[in-house]
Image (spheres, rainbow, N blue to C red):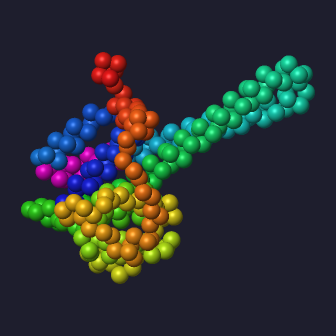
Amino acid sequence: TILFPLREEFEGLFAVTMSEKHKFLRHIMAEYGKKNWNRLLDLMIGSEKIAVQKLQKDIMQIKQQIKQNNAKLAETDAELQESKKRKRVELENFRDGKLCEKEKLKESQKEKERYLKSWTKLRIKLEQAKGHVDKSQSALAFSFIEGALSKAIVEGDWVLLDEINLANSETLECLSSLLESENGSLTLLERGDDRPIKRHRGFHLFACMNPATDVGKRELPPGLRNRFTEFYMEDLSKNDDLEILIADYLCEQDPTPRHI
């Protein structure tokens, strides 16, 4: 249904925007489980308003902090012009700290502005879904839902396709058009489109495959394989390589000494 991906998108944005109110997500899950679509959408639309207000307030505060930071930097630069050598070292250290703080504030502002745009886009989707539900109380409306690949093309994400040589010929043909050039893209015929998706410049596609020796696996068509930059990776058999891999996994798990 059209609500499953909307709920996932909502929960992801809610978690990074209002993590202190994570218990509210239980209400979202409960209404979704009861298939109370109108109530579910009302909760999500109402939360969007609160999230937007919070982000706008946060952005204003950050801008004010940057303004104050700039004023401090200007004062420090003026003092540096007239300071003695010993005092100058202290002022330069203070100035470096303020510059670092300014960069962090700018990054935080950009991040919150991205979240604000995402909430605005989600609001439009939620209101459209609300219209579908209002028109069809007896049965929830269905619509075409974009997959991970098409979203990645638009948003500039990186995609890893594992065991690519298990894919069927139709999928491989689709990938072939995507890799024709730097501007290669997809056309979603299933959605009724006749124009290709606009490809983000940050989009990258990676693929993994094992030799075509197992059942179901086969060699990639040369025309598709030649569009990739190919690297052959040997089996990990050296202790040094295995230690790097294991250490990387352990960092993600954050185990205690007892677990190790």
Please give the name of the residue rendered at 22% of the width and 54% of the height, measured from the top-left corner.
4
Q: Main secondary structure of the magenta part?
A: helix
Residue 122, given in percent of the width and then of the height, sits at 35, 55
Q: Nearer the viewer, residue 160 or 164?
A: 164
Residue 125, given in percent of the width and then of the height, sits at 32, 60
| Left or right of residue 201, residue 94 in this image | right
Q: In which quarter of the image is residue 185?
A: bottom left
| Left or right of residue 102, residue 16 in this image | left
Residue 40 sits inside the magenta stretch: yes
Q: Which quadrant would the C terminus be assigned to in this image?
A: top left
Q: Report the residue that reaches farthest toward the bottom.
A: 194
- In this view, 72 is above or below 112: above
Residue 36 can be seen, yes or no: yes
| Count of marks placed on residues | 0
Please give the name of the residue rendered at 22% of the width and 67% of the height, measured from the top-left corner.
143
Q: Which of 10 and 99 is in front in this view?
A: 99
Residue 126 can be seen, yes or no: no
Q: Give the range drawn in magenta.
A: 35-48
Please give the name of the residue rendered at 89% of the width and 31% of the height, measured from the top-left corner.
81
Residue 162 sits inside the magenta stretch: no
Residue 215, given in percent of the width and then of the height, sits at 18, 62
- In this view, 59 is above or below 198: above
Q: Which quadrant would the N terminus be assigned to in this image?
A: bottom left
| Left or right of residue 85, residue 46 in this image | left
Residue 77, given in percent of the width and then of the height, sits at 82, 33
Q: Report the residue that reaches farthest toward the front.
A: 238
Please give the name of the residue rendered at 85% of the width and 29% of the height, measured from the top-left corner.
80
Q: Nearer the viewer, residue 119 or 4?
A: 4
